[in-house]
Amino acid sequence: EQILEPFTKETGIKVVYEASSDFATLLPVLVESGNAPDLAMFPQPGLMADFAREGQLVPVDTFMDKSQLSAAYSQNWLDLATVDSKVYGVWIRAAVKSLVWYNRAAFKAAGYKIPTTWNEMMALSDQIVADGGVPWCIGIESGAATGWVGTDWIEDIMLRTVGGEVYDQWVAHKIPFNHPAVKNAFEQFGNIALNPKYVFGGTVGIISTPFGDATAPLFDNPPGCYLHRQASFITSFLPKDVALDKDVSIFLLPGIKQELGVPVLVSGIVTAMFKDTPEARKLMEYLSTAQAHTIWASQGDYVSPHKQVSLDAYPNDIVKRQAEILANADMVRFDGSDMMPGAVGTGTFWSGIVDYIGGTDVDTVLKTIEDSWPD
């Protein structure tokens, strides 16, 4: 609403915003029943692409100039909003996903150091266990979207073990879902998630803990856990008495193969247009301005993908650090599950994570996901 205020003031156009916790399920129903919204804010560009290919969306480059778009977004982000050579969406916010959160005071008191490689991170996990603690907190419960938290781990590990090119092939189904590289990523994740000494509450805790509550044990005294891998938006869910810059800090999830550097996994929200009206066009144009993005950045929960937003727009050091991580990344890739066809990316990949953590063997999980890929 804060973002829309200047728009309404300037244009007199009133915007009705409706939120949904089951967006990926609800939107196709609305569209099929002829009740599509004027605009939709997609957390999954894969779902946006599905609608674009069905001819349901209006390409923004039919009314916005290419130079206007490239002044606002890097080619990476424009490519992510492009379907069959047409730009369909404007990005309104980004989240850096490859982050590990920790309680500063607890870390300092225990004398732990920030790991800079994956092996160091696993050694730190062993050290925490040896000291009588639990290294990790993981919670994947998220209503109809349960499982997405685990898909982020798999994507981060894929980028760190096989690099961007193979990752892109996997997302586009140019290699099968049960490819050895994917199996390896699941097993590396399993080395943490399936180790009862490593995770607060064990596998039952992982499946039953809402993702937003998973950070709470970091701040218990003594700490229930020391590390939590989650995207930048987790700041909205931190316990109320936690002060961002004082109590909590972040490090970039370390690399695994030195030659691949430290990739950064991102997600974001892209807005696309179902109904071509003058009002909808105006709002799309506004959402691609530095003005709108600077307001978004000032709220501190997200990083802006807009090129013209200054670091000074961010209200605290943690989110400033994320903006720097994004700007200086060795490699940036979008959340893979959000790019895959909905049946997989917001379907069997999510449920496959739950099955894997619940004890189903990895080959069965991967074959089920592979078999579900639409022809």
Image (cartoon, rainbow, N blue to C red):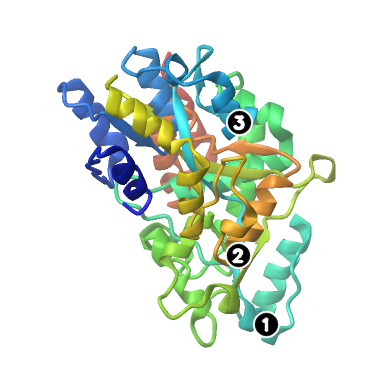
Residue 71: mark = 3
Q: Is residue 314 visible?
A: yes
Q: Amino acid at mark 3?
A: Ala
Category of crowding for the residue at label 3, using alpha-carbon neighbours closer than 10 angstroms: few (below 14), some (14–19), many (at least 20) = some
Q: Secondary structure at mark 3?
A: helix
Confirm or deny contact between disc 3 and disc 1 (CB under 8 A): no
Q: Amino acid at mark 1?
A: Asp
- In primary-sequence order, the first of circles 3 and 1 is 3
Q: Secondary structure at mark 2?
A: helix
Residue 318: mark = 2
Q: Quadrant of residue 108?
A: bottom right
Image coordinates of residue 321 in percent, x first then y, are 66, 59
Category of crowding for the residue at label 2, using alpha-carbon neighbours closer than 10 angstroms: few (below 14), some (14–19), many (at least 20) = many
Q: Is residue 307 above or below residue 113?
A: above
Quickly name the residue at label 1: 131
* Residue at the image point whose x is 15% and y is 23% from the top: 33
* Residue at the image point whose x is 40% and y is 76% from the top: 240
Along the line of sight, the residue nearer the viewer: 298 or 221: 298
Q: Quadrant of residue 184?
A: top right
The answer to whether residue 32 is left or right of residue 309 is left
Image coordinates of residue 182 in percent, x first then y, are 61, 35
Image coordinates of residue 32 in percent, x first then y, are 20, 21
